[in-house]
Image (cartoon, grey):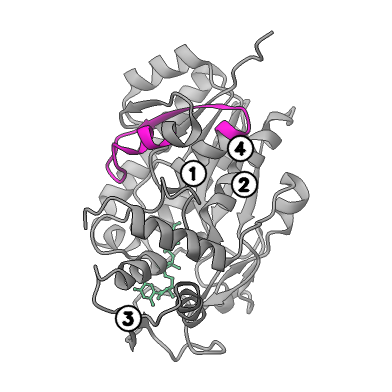
């Protein structure tokens, strides 16, 4: 007897974290359905996912605000749950164009919630960010954060859309919704699938550290600038919790499985990080060790908006989701380096 297919809608499923999550969902026996308007992802990703998983991938080129398309998908697949990645996510761009971020990131979420109510969809995993913690050291005196660490106004409109998104979900659950929500606060996703088939595809000059490092090492960028070396940290550079994107993807599957077991409507927040802090300098040194040659880099001025240090206490995800990160930053760097040398070049 064929097991009932469990369809999961993955919004933004052709993106960096979304595509890696699609692979993990298939490996866990789910049937993902991608909706993506490809504003920040490449149209060749779904076919690469088919090659990687040896499964037909259902991918629809549309925005979450396209109610007609969304309604047809919910009616056709009767989703067990939704994983909502679709959002604009460039911190710097959100400062220069806040209305684009408030409009897209909030209206896409609200469109999904309305459809979940219409079709009585049980589960939602929401992609949030550690950026909602602001600068924890200045409020709690500690750089390690638990889910109830004091919230500050996040330092960008992008971060605000994540905090407001969380508040929308709290109010939605407190109203008549019969759904269950797992709200995942990501730290710093890095790396790529070991196959070399999918990975990070920054548009233009990378904002994030590791893609800038790998592009420098292959000669696309001339030199890495380390933004600031006189922070109040051991080596003077900023500390972050870098997590392998496959560990992060795995956390989404653990969340979907956990939501499936819940019997009453509710919402839970989870830090998805390794629980370890790594400095920029340590990342550079780890990269040079992995590739066996020096990187071209120099110190430069601090980047506005950067906070000195933040990393996760991930104990709640371990205890409630039975999830914890498995890969080291060295494995993530090795996988990111393989991808950089394999990926299509459109820089
Ligand atoms: C990491 C460190 C930089 C580039 C961002 C988003 C956050 C979340 C994760 C989505 C910082 C330093 C970087 C460079 C450098 N995204 N750096 N030279 O800023 O911690 O967080 O990604 O949820 O919302 O803000 O990540 O990779 O940009 O920077 O020295 O060329 O690397 O100063 O200390 P960040 P990042």
Asked whether mark 3 lies closer than 8 Å to ligand 1, one says: yes
Segment tinted magenta in the rendering: 26-49
Helix, strand, or loop for circle 1?
helix
- Earlier sequence position, callout 4 versus callout 3: 4
Residue identified by numbered label 4? 181
How far from the left and from the top, in percent, is residue 192? 46, 54
Please tell me whether mark 1 or mark 2 is closer to you in this view. 1
| C-alpha gap between disc 1 and disc 3 | 29 Å
Residue identified by numbered label 1? 20
**Residue 212 or residue 193, whichever sits in front:** 193
Q: Are marks 2 and 3 in contact (CB under 8 Å)?
A: no
How far from the left and from the top, in percent, is residue 64? 36, 31
- Earlier sequence position, callout 1 versus callout 4: 1
Is 45 colored magenta in this rendering?
A: yes
| C-alpha gap between disc 2 and disc 3 | 32 Å
**Residue 22 or residue 293, whichever sits in front:** 293
Residue identified by numbered label 3? 225
Residue identified by numbered label 2? 251
């Amino acid at each position: 007897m064929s097991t009932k297919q469990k369809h999961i809608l993955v919004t933004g499923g052709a993106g960096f974290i979304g595509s890696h999550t699609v692979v993990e969902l298939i490996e866990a026996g789910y049937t993902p359905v991608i909706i993506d308007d490809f504003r920040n992802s490449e149209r060749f990703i779904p076919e690469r996912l088919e090659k990687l998983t040896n499964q037909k991938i259902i991918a629809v080129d549309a925005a979450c605000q396209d109610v007609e398309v969304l309604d047809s998908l919910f009616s056709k697949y009767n989703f067990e749950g939704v994983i909502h990645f679709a959002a604009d996510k460039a911190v710097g761009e959100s400062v220069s164009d806040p209305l684009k971020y408030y409009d897209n990131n909030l209206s896409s979420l609200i469109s999904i919630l309305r459809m979940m109510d219409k079709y009585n969809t049980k589960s939602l995993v929401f992609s949030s960010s550690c950026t909602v913690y602001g600068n924890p050291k200045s409020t709690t005196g500690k750089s390690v954060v638990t889910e109830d660490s004091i919230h500050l106004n996040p330092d960008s409109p992008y971060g605000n859309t994540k905090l407001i998104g969380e508040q929308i979900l709290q109010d939605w659950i407190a109203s008549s919704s019969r759904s269950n929500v797992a709200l995942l606060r990501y730290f710093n996703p890095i790396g790529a699938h070991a196959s070399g088939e999918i990975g990070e595809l920054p548009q233009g000059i990378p904002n994030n550290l590791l893609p800038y490092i790998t592009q420098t090492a292959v000669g696309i960028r001339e030199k890495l600038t380390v933004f600031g070396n006189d922070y109040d940290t051991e080596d003077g550079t900023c500390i972050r919790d870098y997590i392998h994107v496959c560990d992060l993807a795995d956390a989404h599957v653990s969340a979907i499985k956990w939501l499936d077991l819940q019997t009453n409507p509710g919402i839970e927040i989870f830090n998805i990080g390794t629980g370890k802090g790594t400095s920029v300098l340590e990342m550079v040194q780890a990269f040079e060790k992995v590739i066996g040659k020096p990187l071209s880099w120099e110190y430069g001025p601090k980047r506005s908006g950067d906070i000195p240090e933040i990393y996760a206490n991930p104990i709640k995800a371990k205890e409630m989701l039975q999830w914890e990160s498995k890969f080291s930053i060295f494995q993530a760097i090795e996988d990111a380096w393989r991808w950089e040398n394999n990926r299509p070049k459109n820089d």
